[in-house]
Amino acid sequence: MSGPALYVLYRGPLTSCNYDCPYCPFAKRVDPPELLRADRAALHRFADWVAATIDRRLSILFTPWGEGLTRSWYRETITRLSHLPHVDRVAIQTNLAARTGWLADADRDTAALWTTYHPGQVGRDRFLARCRELDALGVRYSVGVVGLPAHLDEARALRALLPPHVYLWVNAADGHVYTADEEAAWTALDPRFGDSVRPHPSRGLPCHAGETAISVLGDGTVRRCHFVDGAIGNLYDGTWRAALKPRTCPNVACDCHIGYVHLKPLGLRDVYRDGLMERVVHRAEEFTRGSIYTH
Ligand code: SF4
Ligand code: SF4
C-alpha cells in the first residue's frame, strides 16, 4: 500500500481513569455507562474509517483524556488496526496499569505504547514488571514521567532499572519554573527535556498540523491539532481531504509534545522518525548526541 502519510491523533469522549494523579483533572473520574457506550461506538466508527482509508499511510495515536487500555474496545481496536497493511503505527498513551497479554495478538511491528509512570499511583516494581512484559512480547514503548521535583529520585531509580534500549522522556510540569540546576538534573535523564521545558513560540510558523497531521474527535470533527480550536473538516463526510494544506500556527506558543513535534522549524520528525507516535527517539540520535540513555 502506498499514499501520502497522515498522522492522526484521536480522542473520544472517554474521561475516566483508574488512577488519582494529583496533577490531573481526570483523576479517578467515573464515566456513566451511556458515555462508555458512546466512546466505544465512536472508536469503532473511527476504526472503520481507518480500515477504509487505504489511499493514505496512517500513523495513529490515541490520546484519551483518561485511561483507554482498561477498556476492551481500545485493546481490540489497536489489535485490529495493527494488522492493516496501510497502517504504519497505532499507539496509545497509557498508564500501563492494565494487563499486556492482549498485545500477543497484535502486529508488534505496528502496535506501540506511550507509557507514563506515575509515582504514588503504582509501585516502581510493579511498573517495571509491566515493562518486562512488553519486552518479552517485543512491543515498542516509551516511558515517561512528569518532571515534578518530588519525582526526581524516583525517575533516576527508574532510569537505572529500565533496559538501556527503552527511552525515558520527561515532561516539564505545568506551572513549574525550572532553575538551571533542575533543568540540568532532568536533562541528565532525558536529553530532550529542553524541548519540553519552555513553550515554543509558534505564531505564524509553518506546522505540519492541518497538512499531514490531524486531530480527530469522537464525532469525526477534524481539527489541525488538539490545541487550535475550530474544525477544518469532518472525517466521516470526506471534508478532511480538501482541508489538508500547508498552514501556519495561529497560537502564540505550542507547549505540548504531541503538538510541537509537528512544528516544522523544530525538525522533530527527523528526531523521532518512525517513533513519532509513541515518543521513541530514533536510535541515530544516540550517536549524534552521545549516549542518550543514562544507565
Ligand atoms: S494516569 Fe493519566 S489520565 Fe489517569 S489520573 Fe494520572 S495523569 Fe490523569
Ligand atoms: S504549532 Fe502546535 S498549536 Fe500550533 S498548529 Fe502546530 S501543533 Fe497546533
Image (tube, rainbow, N blue to C red):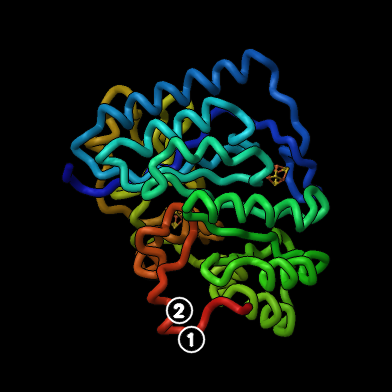
Residue 14 in view, yes or no: yes
Circles 1 and 2: CB atoms closer than 8 Å: yes
Residue 85 found in image quarter: top left
Residue 134 spot, x, y in % from top left: 55, 51
Compared to residue 288, the image places residue 152 above or below, namely above
Residue 86 spot, x, y in % from top left: 25, 40
Residue 82 spot, x, y in % from top left: 37, 39
Residue 210 in view, yes or no: no
Q: Residue at x 68, y 57 (%)?
A: 128
Which residue is the extreme one toward the top?
Answer: 34
Q: Residue at x 47, y 26 (%)?
A: 43
Where does the N terminus fall, quadrant-wise? top left
Compared to residue 127, the image places residue 151 above or below, namely below
Compare residues 113 and 146 and report the one nearer the observer: 113
Residue of label 2 = 286
Label 2 neighbourhood size at 10 Å, few (<14), some (14-19), many (20+)? Answer: few
